[in-house]
Each structure stands twice: as structure tokens, then as C-alpha cells.
Amino acid sequence: MQSERTSERTSELQKPTSTGHHSQISDAVKKREDVVAKNLTLPKDHPKRLNAEIALAHAYQYGDRIPEAIKLFEHVLAQRKALPDDHFDRLASEYDLGGAYMMNNLMLEAVELLYEAVNKEMTLPEDHPDRQIAEKALHVARRYNDQISTAATLLAKISVQQETHPEDHPDRLASENRLAEIYRYRNQVPKAMNLFKHILSRRDKINADHPILVGAEHGLAIAYRYNDQIPEAIEILEGLVERQKTLPENDHRRRASRCALAVAYVHNNQIAEADKLLEEGGC
């Protein structure tokens, strides 16, 4: 039972990716909302009511309704504050809320909450799954928080470069490309796409095969895939793969483009094309 709960907790700490099955998610939310409504007559701390609310909060997460998920997770944790500090249900609620905070870019809140939870599990052996998951969760929250600081620094740097460097200056392009990658990594996909497109608009001023432009093309393709714009991602990646055929077979740029295209083919149900691509050179 403990291992099952552990695996559940791990999956809920991860940011869900879009699958395109929005109607299925909506159906799941509606069903869980109905269950919560039926249990409203129970005491606020009744396990059956709390479990129904947790299930609904997770459904909200997968439907990108993060503020609603946070509100429910905060309610559940408030009810479980009466439990001992190291009680599994209380710790699980802290991880749930910490994960939701991360998804809503509330990194300071996530780090603070997860740090407290990790400290409670430090009495466990170093190789205990719960302790390892706790440490991993805190590491992820801190990494995201570091990226916010990096993004702020890059924004300030770009602001200065806009005054001192022309649009096609390599330093300015590199800063913008790095910021776009951070946006994409933190699931701010529209911001990432706009910045990648802005970078690529300079291709008439510098060599199309310049590493920064190639990186921006690759980044835009991945952002398209995250945004369920698979045909657009495939179009970019097919162009990259074709242009990079002159590179050595084991060149990391060529392999990265080929792998990304294979993934896009799979998302587009072009399994034969993905298999052929991988058979020709692998990833």
C-alpha cells in the first residue's frame, strides 16, 4: 500500500502534459465534482469527503485549472493539520499542494512547503522511497525557483542589449533564445513561441544555419508540439532534418532533430514514418 501511495504522489508532483483529450478531462472533472457534492453533508475532516476533494483537485490539475486545485488542496491540508507532523496523509497533502504551487509558478511557497515536508522525512533511511521522493520534489521546486531568477536576470540583460546591440547581434539573440527556452520549460508556451518567432524573424540578416537560429527553430517546434500544433512542429523538424543531412551521423544536433521529429510523428499517429526515421539513424 505504501509503495502504491508513493507512486501516486510522484506522478502528481509532475506537470501533466497535454494529450488532446480535453473532453475526457472535462468528463472526469464533472464526475468528481458530483462525488464531492454528494459528500458535502459529511464533516469537513471525514476521510471519504477529503478523498473525493483530493481526486477532484487532481482532475483540476490535469485540466489546467490550477487555482481551483490549489484551493482544494489547501482545504484538505487545513483539515489534516490535526494529524501528527510525520503522518503519511498530512505529508501527502503537503506534496500535493507543493506540486500545485509549482504548476502555478508560486515557487517560493512551493519551496517553503516542500522544505518542511522533507525535513520531516529526514529520519527515514537515505534509500527509503519516501525520503528520495521528498528530496527530488524539493530539488525540482528549487530548480524552478532558480529559473525565475535567471529569467528576471535575462530580461534585464535583454533590456540593456536592446539599447546597445542591433537586433541581429549574437549576444542579444543568445539571451533571447535562452529566455524562450526557460518560458517553454516552465510551460509558458505562448510566450516561448512568440519569442522564438521573434528570433527567427532575423534569419534574413544572419546565416540560416547559425546555431542560435537552429536552436530557435528546434525550440519553436517543441513548443508547437506542447501546444498540440503537431503539423507545424513536423514541418519545421522535417526541414531541419533535411538540412542537417550533411552533418556527421553522430552529430548531436542531427540526432536531436531526428529524435524530435520521430516524437512528433508518433503524436501525429505517423508510426511508420517514426519507425523508419529511427531505423535509419536512431536517436
Image (cartoon, rainbow, N blue to C red):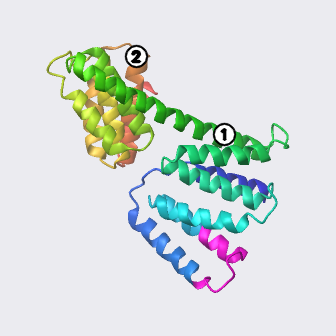
**Horizontal and vertical percent position of residue 7:** 68, 52
- Asked whether, in this view, residue 180 is left or right of residue 112, the answer is left
Q: Residue at x 66, y 39 (%)?
A: 136
Q: Residue at x 21, y 18 (%)?
A: 168
Q: Are marks 1 and 2 in contact (CB under 8 Å)?
A: no
Amino acid at pointer 2: Glu
Depth check: give the residue in front, 261 or 123.
123
Please tell me whether mark 1 or mark 2 is closer to you in this view: 1
Residue bearing the label numbered 2: 249
- Residue 100 visible in the snapshot: yes
- Asked whether, in this view, residue 144 is left or right of residue 264, the answer is right
Q: Is residue 178 above or below residue 99?
A: above
Label 1 crowd bin: few (<14), some (14–19), many (20+), radius 10 Å: some
- Residue furthest to the left: 204
Amino acid at pointer 1: Lys
Q: Residue at x 72, y 48 (%)?
A: 117
Of helix, strand and loop, which one carries label 2?
A: loop
Of helix, strand and loop, which one carries label 1?
A: helix
Residue 73, picture quadrant: bottom right
Name which of mark 1 and mark 2 comes first in the sequence.
1
Depth check: give the residue in front, 39 or 233.
39
Residue bearing the label numbered 1: 136
Q: Is residue 42 above or below residue 155?
A: below
Gap between marks 1 and 2 measured at Cα: 35 Å
**Horizontal and vertical percent position of residue 141:** 58, 41
Residue bounds of the magenta highlight: 38-54
- Asked whether, in this view, residue 75 is left or right of residue 194, the answer is right
